[in-house]
Amino acid sequence: MAKQEVTYQDILQQLKLRQFSPIYVLMGEEPYYLDKLTDYFESNVLSEDERLMNQIVYYGKDAQVETIINEAMQFPLMSPYRLVILKEAQTLENKNKLDLLEHYLKQPASSTILVITYKYGTIDRRKKWIQQAEKLGVVLESRKLRDYQVSTFIESLAKSVRLSIDEEATAMLIEFIGTDLTQLESVINKLNILLTTNRRITTEIIEKTIGISKDYTAFELVNALIAKDVVRSNRIIMHTTSAIQQIISVLFNYFSGLMIYHYLTNKSKDNVVAQLRINPYFVKDYELGARNFSKMQTFKTIGYLREYDAKSKGVNNPSANDLDLLKELIYKILH
């Protein structure tokens, strides 16, 4: 039977119970969870007095794997554990030197906790030392969240600090910040400090405290387009501060979903949420879009978005600026 994939929550729970493994390999495209776990190791495994002699931190670009292994083989002084951390392992001068860990892991020091973080990528799981690490300890692959998962992440963050957040406010944060989990956490923490009485995050609160203007976002442009509101659509593109490629990305995500919606035989709310992987709040937007954009119009719109995405990157566009491109694009979508 295949070993069940370990999660961030699994590791954190084990650490809080002080159930330590001899090695942790924390890798993946999403740095948020890697940083959170590394911070926990540094701050909570050893006491302040124990850290002085038993906590060693190296950074990839300045580290030698041989030195790290030597440190891992040492006995702790006046402490039950020795903690050795290699951060930013992806910046090692010779990443293949990590293969030297194969020999160490055949008989790792029982009192050493070795932590290796490898950001923005993964280590080949076919490597023998990684396979040994999975048998002896913990290997976490931290993957980027998909767009539909980010709203749950934001809601969980807010709940963890006893805040609530409107669905529209969640969508606004995703549009402007995207899937940068660290920045999203920073925004929620800021709001946690500012909202001392009314603990509900709304679009108005975000506008006031974060400086995002709801009236001229790509999210509002979607609403204007699916309502076939020509005046509001043009007003938004004249005043928006969003980059053209960000706007096109938001529109493309919506109209791609609308095409799927058109072909659903079961258009119940629950099925739409499951098939499009969206928050239930946004089902109404697809219902409205389907009334105002036929299958063929939706298909053509997706084509326009692909065309103008290429033009915004300089393909078949010798001179038009971003605003002119947006005006052309919105005209084609609405006519």
Image: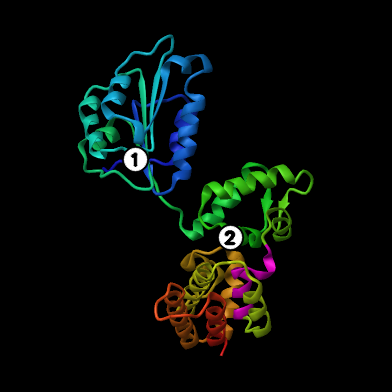
Tell me which segment is drawn in magenta: 213-226
- The amino acid type found where label 2 is placed reads Phe
Residue 104: which quarter of the image?
Answer: top left
Q: What percent of the width, then of the height, locates residue 215?
A: 69, 69
- Residue lying farthest top? 78
Q: What percent of the width, then of the height, locates residue 294?
A: 51, 87
Residue at label 2? 176
Q: Residue at x 55, y 78 (%)?
A: 326
Helix, strand or loop under label 2: helix
Helix, strand or loop under label 1: helix
Residue at label 1? 91
Q: What percent of the width, then of the height, locates residue 265?
A: 46, 78
Is 318 placed left or right of 4 in the picture? right
**Category of crowding for the residue at label 2, using alpha-carbon neighbours closer than 10 angstroms: few (below 14), some (14–19), many (at least 20):** some
- Can residue 216 be found in the magenta stretch? yes
73 in relation to 39, above or below = above
Is 4 placed left or right of 10 in the picture? left
- The amino acid type found where label 1 is placed reads Thr
